[in-house]
């Protein structure tokens, strides 16, 4: 059991530490709203994962994946949301370049909005549901793939995700003195393009 749990943590760490839309969104929101918004984004992502965990553990994911129109529609909605968030970052970079003072005066992203963005971004990616449905049973004890066991493994994954993304939210503000206007503009541009690219990839990828 201990070996299985360690193997699950190791696999989860590799998956979580691989940069993706959650990482890009956390960095974007930390730059926009500071540490609080970054941590809130991490919490939102974890909440979204928790919802997928419950759905996968209860077998609801099977119903979702069995309905191609619903699965496809959810993918398109999630992809559009990522493109929208990426477009916001690109627009912020453009405004920062041409209207520096106006950008400084703009209100920062609130933790509440950041939390909502984290939740919606994760729930808008139905591939997370497929991921949990395929990952969790592999590490359940032989003959013990019960709802409680799958739920516990899923929530552990959520906690590890929250911890890793929170690291970004805490580390980035510590570099605040090094983040000149030019550097922040570059970071906004990069995260914007990354989110847009991830949105298009989500929309066009097969399952």
Image (cartoon, helix red, strand yellow):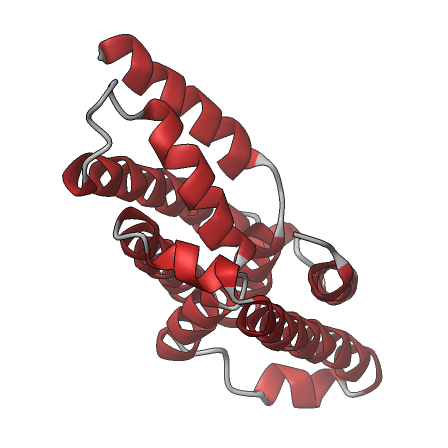
- Above or below: residue 88 compared with residue 175: below
Q: Nearer the viewer, residue 160 or 202?
A: 202
Residue found at x 46% / y 38%: 134
Q: Position of residue 105 (x, y in %)?
A: 58, 88
Identity of the residue furthest to the front in this view: 66
Q: Is residue 167 visible?
A: no
Quadrant where the N terminus is found in the figure: top left
Left or right of residue 39, residue 122 in this image? right
Q: Is residue 198 visible?
A: yes
Identity of the residue furthest to the left in this view: 148
- Above or below: residue 93 compared with residue 182: below
Q: In which quarter of the image is residue 160?
A: top left
Residue found at x 65% / y 74%: 76
Q: Where is residue 150 in the image (x, y as percent from the top left)?
A: 26, 38
Q: Which of 96 and 28 is in front in this view?
A: 28
Left or right of residue 28, residue 143 in this image? left
Q: Total number of numbered labels?
A: 0
- Above or below: residue 157 compared with residue 12: below
Residue found at x 22% / y 22%: 143
Left or right of residue 134, residue 56 in this image? left
Q: Position of residue 88 (x, y in %)?
A: 68, 79
Q: Position of residue 189 (x, y in %)?
A: 78, 65
Identity of the residue furthest to the right in this view: 98
Q: Which of 89 and 58 is in front in this view?
A: 58
Residue found at x 41% / y 44%: 133
Q: Nearer the viewer, residue 183 or 150?
A: 150
Q: In which quarter of the image is residue 141?
A: top left
């Amino acid at each position: 059991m201990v070996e299985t749990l360690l193997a699950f943590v190791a696999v989860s760490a590799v998956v979580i530490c691989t940069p993706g839309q959650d990482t890009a969104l956390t960095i974007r929101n930390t730059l926009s709203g500071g540490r609080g918004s970054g941590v809130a984004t991490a919490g939102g992502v974890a909440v979204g994962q928790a919802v997928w965990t419950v759905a996968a553990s209860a077998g609801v994911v099977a119903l979702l994946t069995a309905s191609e129109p619903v699965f496809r529609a959810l993918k398109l909605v999630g992809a559009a949301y990522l493109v929208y968030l990426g477009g916001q970052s690109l627009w912020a970079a453009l405004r920062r370049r041409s209207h520096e003072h106006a950008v400084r005066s703009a209100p920062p992203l609130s933790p509440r909005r950041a939390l909502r963005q984290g939740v919606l971004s994760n729930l808008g990616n139905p591939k997370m549901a497929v991921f949990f449905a395929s990952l969790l049973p592999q590490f359940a004890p032989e003959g013990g793939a019960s709802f409680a066991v799958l739920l516990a493994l899923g929530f552990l994954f959520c906690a590890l995700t929250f911890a890793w993304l929170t690291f970004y939210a805490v580390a980035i503000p510590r570099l605040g003195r090094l983040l000149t206007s030019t550097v922040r503009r570059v970071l906004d541009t990069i995260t914007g393009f990354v989110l847009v690219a991830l949105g298009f990839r989500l929309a066009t990828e097969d399952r």
